[in-house]
């Protein structure tokens, strides 16, 4: 059920140095991650690979040009002392929508896989996900642990686009996270909430089909409402922080890096979208 969420292609924009390599092996990653969660049979793996390859081709042709277009629209704002906050906010929202769009591409494949799962595979999935939740809880048990985990994630993402951060910039990010902590606990509670709905629907094919389809069409609709609210508040606060405070700290070299990376990634995605 979760494999599409693990291969969000928008993540490749901020976490993978070579999108072409990522897409070349995306089907392997999808099948491998799904197998980890569900312990698939060889027949299930083969069927999944064929379906995922078709889904990925559709994403490449239809979604990547849209992502590239957004990157190109952001680029002119880079050299400004203060970017157009409304415009940048709109682009942030567009990227959030790309997450949902990517998930929806895998809906039919996910429904097909779910309907063929055996009882022991549901049990295996529940154990894997709950182990993942426990690991997250352990790594964020103390406030400083949670801060460090969030900081590392934001630092990696930002440095990918602009290069190394100054000490002052690192402190700005840490201060933001301290003031607006990421809702780790609600995230884990939401995972358990979604898992329960999934397991409760497994005995009724029509109910299961609807739940999985709804999950892939709009995963926010089946998440814990409190988590959705907290995450949206955190995300909006982070957007404001980047535009109204962090942007002012960018050096000329960092802006140059950002401009070049936006255009280079847009060009790369456009080329990938045109390949068979």
Image (tube, helix red, strand yellow):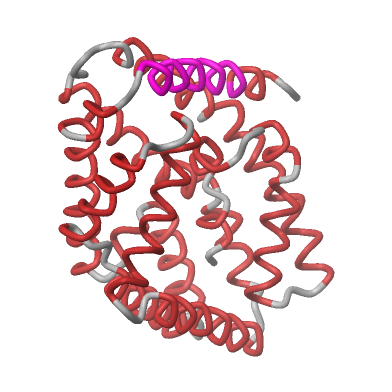
Look at the image and say whether residue 265 sits in the magenta stretch.
Answer: yes
Q: Which of 53 and 95 is in front in this view?
A: 95
Question: Which image quadrant for residue 12?
Answer: top right
Look at the image and say whether residue 246 sits in the magenta stretch.
Answer: no
Q: Nearer the viewer, residue 151 or 38?
A: 151
User: Which residue is depicted at the point 21% across and 60% down?
Assistant: 178
Where residue 162 sits in the image (x, y, percent)? 44, 29
Q: Nearer the viewer, residue 200 or 39?
A: 39
Q: Which of 62 and 230 is in front in this view?
A: 230
From the viewer's perspective, is residue 260 above or below residue 151?
above
Position of residue 116 in the picture relative to residue 15 (left or right):
right
User: Which residue is depicted at the point 19% across and 40% down?
Assistant: 241
Position of residue 169 in the picture relative to residue 48 (left or right):
left
Q: Is the magenta stretch mostly helix, strand or loop?
A: helix
Which region of the structure is painted magenta?
A: 252-269
Where residue 239 sits in the image (x, y, percent)? 23, 39
User: Which residue is depicted at the point 56% across and 87% down?
Assistant: 127
Where residue 143 sits in the image (x, y, percent)? 28, 74
Q: Of all residues shown, which one is farthest toward the right?
A: 42
User: Which residue is depicted at the point 43% across and 18% down?
Assistant: 253
Quarter of the image where the C terminus is located: top right
């Amino acid at each position: 059920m979760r494999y599409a969420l693990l291969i969000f292609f928008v993540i490749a924009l901020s976490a993978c140095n070579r999108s072409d390599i990522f897409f070349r092996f995306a089907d392997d990653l999808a099948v491998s991650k799904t197998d980890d969660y569900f312990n698939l049979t060889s027949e299930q793996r083969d069927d999944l690979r064929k379906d995922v390859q078709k889904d990925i081709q559709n994403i490449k042709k239809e979604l990547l040009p849209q992502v590239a277009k957004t990157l190109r629209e952001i680029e002119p704002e880079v050299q400004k002392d203060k970017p157009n906050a409304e415009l940048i906010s709109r682009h942030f929202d567009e990227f959030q929508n790309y997450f949902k769009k990517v998930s929806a591409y895998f809906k039919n494949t996910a429904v097909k896989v779910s309907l063929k799962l055996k009882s022991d595979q549901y049990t295996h999935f529940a154990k894997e996900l709950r182990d993942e939740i426990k690991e997250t809880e352990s790594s964020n048990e103390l406030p400083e642990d949670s801060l460090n985990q969030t900081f590392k994630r934001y630092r990696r993402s930002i440095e990918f686009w602009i290069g190394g951060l100054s000490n002052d910039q690192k402190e700005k990010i840490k201060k933001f996270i301290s003031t607006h902590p990421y809702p780790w606990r609600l995230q884990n509670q939401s995972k358990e909430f979604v898992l329960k709905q999934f397991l409760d629907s497994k005995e009724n094919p029509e109910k299961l089909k609807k739940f999985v389809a709804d999950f892939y069409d709009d995963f926010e609709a089946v998440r814990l409402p409190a988590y959705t609210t907290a995450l949206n508040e955190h995300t909006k606060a982070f957007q404001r922080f980047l535009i109204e405070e962090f942007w002012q700290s960018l050096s000329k070299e960092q802006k140059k890096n950002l401009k070049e990376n936006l255009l280079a990634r847009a060009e790369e995605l456009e080329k990938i979208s045109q390949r068979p």
